[in-house]
Amino acid sequence: MVVGVLRIELILYSPQNLKEKRGVIRKILDRCRGRFPVSCAETGLQDLWQRSEMGFAVVHGEEAPIQAIFARVEEEIARTGVAEVSARQTEFLHF
C-alpha cells in the first residue's frame, strides 16, 4: 500500500478579502474532490487572502498512478484560471 501526499501552495488572482478567498478555495477543492479520487483540504496560509496551501492525499497499490492523479489535479487547478501553483511537494509513504 502506498499513500501519496501532495502539498501545493497557490497564488490566488481574484480574491480581495478572506471571504472571497474562501469561495475560491471551496470551488477548487470541490472540483478536485468531484473529478479525482483524492482527499483534500486547505492546510495553511488561511490568514492570507491571496495565498493558500492545499493538501491532497491518495491511497493506491503503486506510486505511478498516484503521480498521474497529482499531475491531473495540478492541471485542473491551472485550468480554473483563478490560481497559480507557486510551490509543490510530493511525499510517498510505503506500508
Image (tube, rainbow, N blue to C red):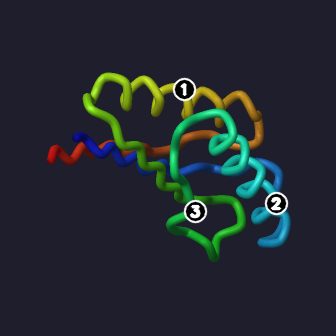
Name the residue that disc number 2 marks.
23
> Is the residue 18 above or below the residue 20 in the image?
below
**Residue at disc 1, secondary structure:** helix
Name the residue that disc number 1 marks.
72
Name the residue that disc number 3 marks.
42
**Residue at disc 3, secondary structure:** strand
How far apart, in angstroms, are the residues tagged by discs 1 and 2?
A: 22 Å
Label 1 packing within 10 angstroms: few (<14), some (14-19), many (20+): some
Horizontal side, residue 51 vs residue 37: left or right: right
Farthest left residue? 95
**38 or 11: nearer the viewer:** 38
**Residue at disc 2, secondary structure:** helix
Whole-percent x and y of residue 90? Answer: 33, 42
> Is the residue 55 above or below the residue 4 in the image?
below
In which image quadrant can residue 31 be found?
top right
How far apart, in angstroms, are the residues tagged by discs 2 and 3?
A: 12 Å
How far apart, in angstroms, are the residues tagged by discs 3 and 1?
A: 18 Å
**Which amino acid type corresponds to the residue marked 2 in the rendered image?**
Gly
Whole-percent x and y of residue 52? Answer: 59, 59
Whole-percent x and y of residue 25? Answer: 71, 56
For the image shown, how many numbered marks are present on the structure? Answer: 3
**Which amino acid type corresponds to the residue marked 1 in the rendered image?**
Arg
The answer to the question of whether label 2 and label 3 lie on touching residues, with beta carbons closer than 8 A, is no
**57 or 95: nearer the viewer:** 95
The answer to the question of whether label 3 and label 1 lie on touching residues, with beta carbons closer than 8 A, is no
Sequence-first disc among 2 and 3 = 2
**Which amino acid type corresponds to the residue marked 3 in the rendered image?**
Glu
- Image quadrant where one finds the N terminus: top left
> Is the residue 81 above or below the residue 57 in the image?
above
Sequence-first disc among 1 and 2 = 2
Label 3 packing within 10 angstroms: few (<14), some (14-19), many (20+): some
**25 or 83: nearer the viewer:** 25
